[in-house]
Amino acid sequence: MTETVYDYIIVGGGTAGCVLAHRLSADPDVRILLLEAGGRDNHPMIHMPIGFAKMTSGPHLWGYSTVPQIHANNREIPYAQARVIGGGSSINAEVFTRGVPDDFDRWAEEEGCKGWSFEEIQPYFLRSEGNSILADQWHGTEGGLGVSNLQDPQPMTLAFVQACQELGLPYNPDFNGSSQAGCGVYQVTVRDGRRCSTARGFLKPVLQRPNLNVHTGATVHKIIIEKGRAQAVDYIHRGKHRRTAAEREIIVAAGAIGTPKLMMLSGVGPADHLDSHGITVTHDLPGVGENLNDHFGIDIVAELTGHYSLDKYNTWYRAVLAGLQYALFKSGPITSNVVEGGAFWFTDTANSQPDLQFHFLAGAGAEAGVPSVPKGSSGITLNSYTLRPKSRGTVRLRSQKPDDPPLIDPNFLSHPDDLRIAVEGVKVSREIFAQKSLQKYISQLRYPDSNVQSQSDFEAYARQYGRTSYHPTCTCKMGIDELAVVDPQCQVRGIDALRICDCSIMPSLIGSNTNAVTVMIAEKASDMIRGIC
């Protein structure tokens, strides 16, 4: 039975969905329903910047893994996808980077996405950003996404930045400014010592609007499409089956994995795949679930000669003291996002833009599945990845049952250029750890050990230790070619009143972290929906 009719139904209360709810509900004459499968962001670790280290596994995730990765030793790699209001912005490492202008000009000029050049999307970056430090043509100060400098970077992070400079990388105080190349301390999506997810920055301030309803714990099973138009959604909420209609549009913002899954369950996708699962084909759209593009990060880990990193807070008494300091003063180690430092650099300085990104973690074993150091010791970690990987994978249905997890195949390292650049990243990482500013603290390099020397050794290491960097994109890509799922207005091709507005519409992966870009997509899409642009 169809329930209350809304103007807009937003499926997915993640990074993009919270922004969309904020912007669309600003018009008091429209009725908005936001549906999120996960729960509220009540867990205290979500709001502590250091809580990222506890969020790469646990109850706020869907519990996905990839299918065996044939170019990565057939490993089934854990694939963290958020299941909580705020989505990835509630569990990520809070690193604030957004790529370079060339990334977006490529979308517009080479990939059929008219209207998405850097000049055209920059106002949405500025509108969304609430930077507490920087204010120039590259940065906004009034937006909902709080951005700040780390209060007190860890000594190991500062040593990392110095080691990079000793290797020849210039210091860069702003990776989102006129130049991306170099090393430095990341800005983070933290406001007043607390994580600023889009749930906190965009959704919470408008929850009292009478025209906005938010249902958490609401799992959408199907979009009802009749006569070429999206009409309603079927979902389970509080144990009951519900069907709710939308008069204007249904907007899917369930992310690069959830969005194609829902589309296919609704009969929209590759006809042969849907037929194989007994799903009635509503609209044959071959690109749904294709083109999965993700960063394949590879870690190196060093053991330290003493307790110089955040690992020293693994002891209960230090953890208690840190907790008290944070509770009383919003200061101390809990204000760290762990992934404090970073760099963008070149495998070939003839390149116009960096092709490697590095994340320095002031600890070891902070993320699920990452190697650590012996118990009782302290360590540091450096992760690197190819910024614009050429490997492409898929998201497919396991069955027609909505509760079954999808088949996720990023197809990591399937392109030889990705492996080549990834290996260079590991080599550069090891060189950074060999510089004097870090060497004076390092007891030994645990991963990779001294036996990794030859090119084939490094390739084997990359295949064994690489993992997702939590940046899946492009599975319902925007464009005009045969695999494009949405047009440059984010409208699903061939179906009226249905849009996709999340990271799945990226035509290709940008050369940085993806959270800020997803926020920008939602900002621009909200203006499109309202007829402003």
Image (cartoon, grey):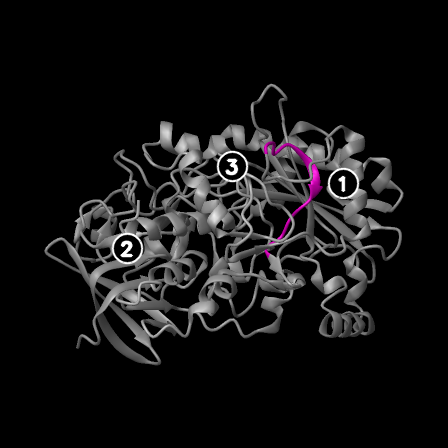
Image vertical order of residue 428 relative to residue 314, above or below: above
Which residue occupies the extreme left position in the image? 227
Q: Main secondary structure of the magenta part?
A: loop
Q: Which residue is drawn at 56% across and 51% down?
A: 141
Q: Which mark is residue 533?
A: none
Residue at (75%, 70%) from the top-left corner?
A: 329
Left or right, residue 428 beside residue 145: right
Which numbered disc covers residue 263? Answer: 2
First reached walking from the N terminus: tag 1 or tag 3: 1
Quickly name the residue at label 1: 161
Foreground mark, 3 or 2?
A: 2
- Mark 1 is surrounded, within 10 Å at the Cα level, by few (under 14), some (14 to 19) or many (20 or more) other residues, namely many
Q: Residues within 10 Å of mark 2 (few under 14, many from 20)?
A: many
Q: What stretch is highlighted in magenta?
A: 178-189
Tell me, yes or no, if residue 374 can be seen here. Answer: yes
Q: Quadrant of the N terminus?
A: bottom left
Q: Is residue 181 magenta?
A: yes
Residue 88, x across and y down, in percent: 50, 58
